[in-house]
Image: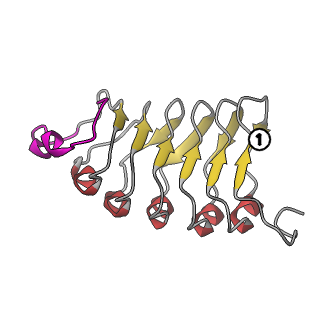
Amino acid sequence: MIGRYHALPSKLSLGTNAFSGTIPKELGSLLDLRMLSFGMNNLSGSLPPELGNLVKLERLWASDNLFTGKIPDFISNWTKLMTLRLQGNSFEGPIPSSFSRLTSMTDMRISELSNVSSSLDFIKEMKYLSHLVLTLRNSMISGSIPSYFGEFQNLERL
């Protein structure tokens, strides 16, 4: 039944509840969504590929659930995305290099990520970052700490 209404919502906030199970793929038909929040629940599985249709999305809060699998590459289709909070799940790496297309990003939080073994070069194009939280312990990231971290004029928290 989701998505059959004439006026589609621009915000959907389902956070801080006791929802369980998987994210319904039908949420991908809410094409006018700008904000989607389902953080702090007991949701599991992976993010359905249909969410890739939400190209107007500016904010996604999916933190503190039981999500697993790889961080979806389709997130890079959300080029208007400013806030991405995926911390507190059990995602696997690597973080897609296509995240470099998320040039409007101001707040990105990813933690508890395993099997990363990639570089952080995708962050280079995120010139508006003010909050960056990447907890990548034992992740086998190669190379040196990127010098461009010093170029983020708006970065308040690293």
Q: Callout 1: 10 Å neighbours few (<14), some, many (20+)? A: few
| Position in image of residue 7 (x %, y %) | 82, 68
Q: Nearer the viewer, residue 81 or 109?
A: 81
| Picture mark count | 1
Q: Is residue 21 one of those drawn in magenta?
A: no
Rendered view: 92 above or below 51: above
Residue, x 65% and y 65% (percent of image)?
A: 50
Q: Nearer the viewer, residue 2 or 71?
A: 2
The stretch in magenta equals 141-158
Residue, x 84% and y 62% (percent of image)?
A: 2
Q: Nearer the viewer, residue 67 or 100?
A: 100
**Which residue does the numbered mark 1 point to in the structure image?**
21
Q: Nearer the viewer, residue 16 or 64?
A: 16
Residue, x 68% and y 66% (percent of image)?
A: 32
Considering every residue shown, the one lying at the far front of the view is 154
Q: Is residue 153 one of those drawn in magenta?
A: yes
Rendered view: 130 above or below 72: above
Q: Left or right: where does residue 150 sit relative to residue 17?
A: left
| Position in image of residue 145 (x %, y %) | 13, 37
Q: Amino acid at mark 1?
A: Gly
| Position in image of residue 109 (x %, y %) | 43, 37
Residue, x 76% and y 54% (percent of image)?
A: 24
Residue 122 occupies which quadrant of the picture?
bottom left
Quadrant showing the C terminus: top left
Quadrant showing the N terminus: bottom right
